[in-house]
């Protein structure tokens, strides 16, 4: 079995180039392990990074169910979008220790 180094090197160069095209790192790169990003809000969406442990909470599961009913699996922000006000979400998340 031969390993073709030129292809690996070329793939690394392409990856580096795609990651360095913008002046900032991609949004997905600034999420620590064990967390995920969601978008919350009725009109203007705000991005939150919360613990994955939040997914096991029944109240958060209800929000996920509402998101599924409203957006299906085609979320307008490209990530998980929760259809509730920012105030309601921050209150719920702080009570559940998500931040």
Image (tube, rainbow, N blue to C red):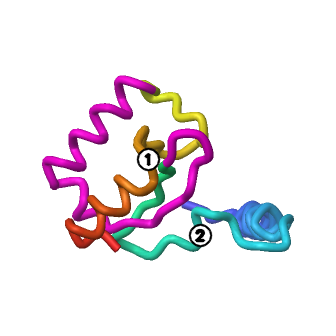
Reply yes or no: does residue 33 show up in magenta: no
Q: Secondary structure at mark 2?
A: helix
Q: Position of residue 40 (x, y in %)?
A: 48, 50
Q: Earlier in the sequence, mark 1 or mark 2?
A: 2
Q: Which mark is residue 85?
A: 1
Which is nearer the eye, 18 or 50? 50
Majority secondary structure in the magenta region = helix
Numbered marks: total? 2
- Taking the spot 59% from the left edge, 35% from the top edge, the residue there is 76
- Taking the spot 59% from the left edge, 40% from the top edge, the residue there is 43
Q: Secondary structure at mark 1?
A: loop
**Which residue was labeled with disc 2?**
29
- Taking the spot 56% from the left edge, 56% from the top edge, the residue there is 46
- Taking the spot 16% from the left edge, 54% from the top edge, the residue there is 56
Q: Quadrant of the N terminus?
A: bottom right
Whether residue 29 sits left or right of residue 65 in the image: it is right
Whether residue 45 sits left or right of residue 65 in the image: it is right
Reply yes or no: does residue 60 show up in magenta: yes
Q: Which residues are magenta?
A: 41-70
Is residue 36 positioned above or below 45 on the image?
A: below
Is residue 86 positioned above or below 52 on the image?
A: above
Give the number of the mark in front: 1 or 2: 1
Give the image quarter of residue 3: bottom right
Which is nearer the eye, 72 or 7? 72
Q: Which mark is residue 14?
A: none
Tags 1 and 2 touching, CB below 8 Å: no
CA distance separating discs 1 and 2: 26 Å
Q: Position of residue 34 (x, y in %)?
A: 34, 71
Q: Quadrant of the C terminus?
A: bottom left
Label 1 environment density (alpha carbons within 10 Å; few <14, some 14–19, many ≥20): some
């Amino acid at each position: 079995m031969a390993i073709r180094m030129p292809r690996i090197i070329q793939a690394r160069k392409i990856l580096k180039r795609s990651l360095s095209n913008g002046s900032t790192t991609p949004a997905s790169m600034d999420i620590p392990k064990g967390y995920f990003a969601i978008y919350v809000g009725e009109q203007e969406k705000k991005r939150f990074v919360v613990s994955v442990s939040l997914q096991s909470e029944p109240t958060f599961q209800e929000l996920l169910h509402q998101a599924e009913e409203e957006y299906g699996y085609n979320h307008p922000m490209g990530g998980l979008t929760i259809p509730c006000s920012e105030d309601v979400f921050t209150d719920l998340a702080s009570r559940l220790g998500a931040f």
